[in-house]
Amino acid sequence: MNSIPGIGTGGRITMAHGGGGTAMRALIDTLFLEAFSATPHAPQEDQARLPLHELAAGGDRLAFTTDSFVVEPLEFPGGNIGTLAICGTVNDLVVGGARPVALSAAFILAEGLELACLRRIVAAMADCAREAGVRIVTGDTKVVPKGACDGLYVTTSGVGVIPAARAISITAAQPGDVVLVNGTLGDHGAAILCARGDLALDVAIASDCAPLGGLVEVLLAAAPNTRSLRDATRGGVAGVLSELAEASNVSLTLDETTLPVRPDVVGVCEILGLEPLFLANEGKLVAVVPQAEAEAALAALRAHPLGRQAAAIGTVAQAGPHGPSVVLRNAFGGRRTVTMPSGEQLPRIC
């Protein structure tokens, strides 16, 4: 393992590693570039350069997204802030039908951050980017005094290319469509809650962090007329469906008996008075597909490792006299309206 001036192979980040001098250069060269760059010793420009002909060959539109990650704790079962950053940005691209091309990654490091922790996070980011088939091509590093942030914040941006035939939009849901999810709900939110240790819950719940590009390609091959795709992160599935109903001017009816939720997540929610529909996910998407393609779409999802517990959870209808709505029907025939939460059930989950 290479040493870094001022902290060696162990130790912690110091203010010198954000000062633009040799310590910062060594940090970038021996940690970030070794993990992220295909050619670590190539000239380092102030920008990434993406060949236009390669982008044009992939489609007729660019997709561009950005997000910041402030999760606490930095490491948790199933991932860390680095995997969360890659998955979050990649998934924001792929649910628009884009094929990810390149990412940027900017790091705010707190003075005193353990180098071993930073190495684990950077290594996880590199592994996750390879899994997603995307390159981290540019970035930035800043160091702030101890206490100015909780160890590490990450901002990632991503560029993808949308093939010409794809027209996926949150405004496209139509009456008669079917609502699908690719697996169990609320895993990430429950994992973060348990990892914080404040409640001493004796359960082992792992985050569902995963890049969903391969799953989306399989889904679109089976259901090429897929209307809408959204990754159900903050606000969970309920938040996504509330936005979709309003944007498409439709009403959605969900069947509570079909919602896939792990028993331990149900248990945590019952103890704390939380609702799995509103808990964050980081490897789950909501798909709205035409009824004629729903069976093929569900079979394709279930054949993929990230969709084995996929389920059809609801249907789309015309908006009622009071406008768009999301309604949850329980096993006894009772119905209740699902509304957008006024705030996060859990802060600092991504």
Image (tube, rainbow, N blue to C red):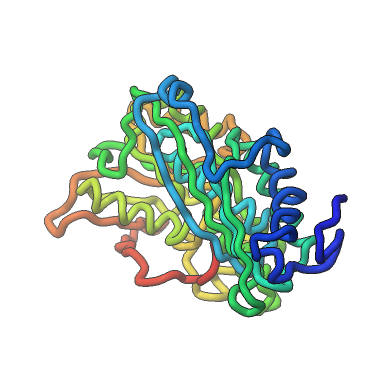
Give the left or right position of residue 323, taking residue 310 as reference.
Answer: left
Residue furthest toward the front?
21
Q: Which residue is at 75% across, 61% downward?
A: 117
Task: Give percent across and percent down for residue 198.
Answer: 66, 79
Q: Which residue is at 47% across, 71% downward?
A: 345
Task: Give percent across and percent down for residue 280.
Answer: 50, 59
In front: 297, or 172?
172
Residue 201 found in image quarter:
bottom right
Report the label total: 0
Give the left or right position of residue 85, taking residue 330 as reference.
Answer: right
Residue 263 found in image quarter:
bottom right
Q: Which residue is at 43% across, 34% downward?
A: 98
Task: Give percent across and percent down for residue 5.
Answer: 81, 61
Residue furthest toward the left?
321
In front: 30, or 247?
30
Q: Is residue 163 visible?
A: yes
Give the left or right position of residue 169, taking residue 313 as reference.
Answer: left
Q: Which residue is at 34% across, 23% downward?
A: 165
Give the left or right position of residue 22, taking residue 220 as reference.
Answer: right
Task: Give percent across and percent down for residue 103.
Answer: 54, 43
Q: Is residue 308 visible?
A: no
Tell me the quadrant of the picture where the C terminus can be found. bottom right
With respect to residue 148, does 261 lie above or below? above
With respect to residue 24, does 58 lie above or below? above
